[in-house]
Amino acid sequence: MFSPVVFDKEACKGCNVCVEVCLMEILQANREKGKPPTVAYPDECAYDGACWLRCPERDKGAIKVVPPLPMRVSILKG
């Protein structure tokens, strides 16, 4: 299954800032403290990057937004 948001389990501290700022509410806080959130509704992602922008650990690679292949191709073609 395709996941629009990927978390690095080592870098993500489980702060859940991404869960709070997600406009489409696709992320859910993990029940285990300190663990990355889960992507509950991957098909609903708007790919706006709000989760990535607000992540305090993004420079460490804690979160990555991955657009689907057709979307990536259209971006590259401009």
Image: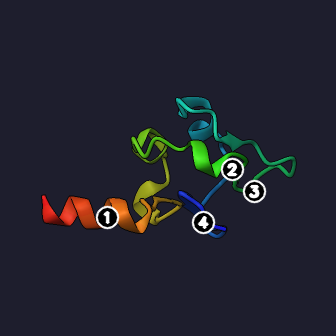
Task: Indicate which disc, 2 or 1, sits on the residue closer to the N terminus.
Answer: 2
Where's residue 30, x and y in %?
Answer: 79, 48
Pick whichever of labels 3 and 1 is earlier in the sequence. 3
Type of amino acid under label 2: Gly
Q: Which residue position is annotated with label 2?
A: 14
Q: What residue type is labelled 4?
A: Phe
Place residue 76 in its image quadrant.
bottom left
Residue 67 picture location, percent across and down: 42, 59
Quadrant (top left/top right/bottom left/bottom right) for the N terminus = bottom right
Disc 4 element? loop
CB contact under 8 Å: marks 4 and 3: no
- Gap between marks 4 and 1, in whole Å? 14 Å
Q: Which residue is located at x 36 percent, y 64 percent? A: 70
Mark nearest the camera among 2 and 4 is 4
Residue 77 rendering spot, x and y as whole percentages: 15, 65
Residues at discs 2 and 3 in contact (Cβ within 8 Å) = yes
Distance between the alpha carbons at the discs numbered 2 and 4: 21 Å
- Closest to the observer, 62 or 51: 51
Q: Mark 4 points at which residue?
A: 2
> What distance separates the C-alpha of mark 4 from that of mark 3?
20 Å
Dot 2 falls on a residue whose secondary structure is: loop
Q: Distance between the residues labelled 2 and 3?
A: 5 Å
| Cα separation between marks 2 and 1 | 28 Å
* Amino acid type, residue under disc 3 in the picture: Lys
Give the residue number, with chain letter if any, for mark 1: 72
Q: What residue do we see at 73% from left, 42% from top?
A: 28
Tell me the residue at 44%/55% (across/down). 58
Q: Which residue matches tag 3?
A: 35
Separation of marks 3 and 1 at Cα, in angstroms? 29 Å
